[in-house]
Amino acid sequence: MAADWQAEFERFPQGLRALVEAELAAGNAVTEVTHDFPAPPIGACLMLARQVSTRPRASGDGLDFRARQSSLTSGEWTDADRRFFVLEPPDPPPAEPSMDAIRAAMVPAPLQEPVPPAFLLEIDRRGEMITYREDGRLATVICTFGDPPRLILRTLTEWWHTEERRSVPMTAEEREAVIGRILDRCRWRHGLPTIARED
């Protein structure tokens, strides 16, 4: 500690002096002794070079500790009289933000939605039938072409595999997916905007 600060340091209460002496013995240093805030005019402030490491940064043993997050200090130690303070230096400034990381975070991630299979609809108005074809299999569903047209859902129950010449029951998930595709295609491409579902 600088010689001209020693006299001021001797005025500090015993608990604060013991704290500073323990820190000096552990390799810390005093960078400044002033009469600035938060000390009143009759007191003084002592700034350490590093945060206190010789005891927990918490109140106890007659000393009061308060963490501070400012450009002046990261913590302050005082006693019940609050005339003398031992201050810890401010935390180092945070690292400069990476502009590359900020720009990358602003780009929305691509949606990983499953792509629906390619399919073909064959609409037989006279026979009141819609045939749905995809990937070597087909399914049929009755559709009444009145006003409004109605897709009779109970008639859509199974797949017919054309090459294997066999039928396989549809799962509930497959059935809902096929119904949704049929309704969308009919509304937007086949001139049936009012087509409705009927169980």
Image (cartoon, rainbow, N blue to C red):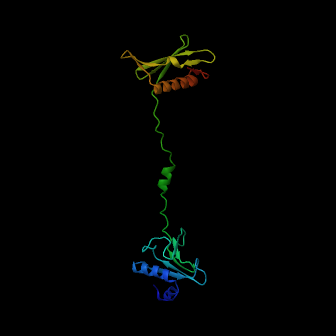
> In this figure, what is the number of numbered marks?
0
Residue 125, above or below 97: above
Foreground of the two, 5 or 84: 84
The quarter holding residue 193 reads top right
Q: Residue furthest top?
A: 126
Q: Residue furthest right?
A: 147
Residue 186: horizontal and vertical position, in percent? 56, 22
Residue 120: horizontal and vertical position, in percent? 48, 21
Which residue is drawn at the image coordinates 50% and 26% (left, top)? Answer: 176
Residue 100: horizontal and vertical position, in percent? 47, 54
Residue 66: horizontal and vertical position, in percent? 53, 71
Foreground of the two, 114 or 74: 74
Q: Quadrant of the C terminus?
A: top right
Foreground of the two, 9 or 159: 9
Which residue is drawn at the image coordinates 46% and 38% (left, top)? Answer: 112
Foreground of the two, 37 or 193: 37
Residue 191, above or below 10: above
Which residue is drawn at the image coordinates 44% and 19% (left, top)? Answer: 158
Which residue is drawn at the image coordinates 54% and 24% (left, top)? Answer: 185
Residue 197, above or below 49: above
Q: Residue furthest left?
A: 164
The quarter holding residue 190 reads top right
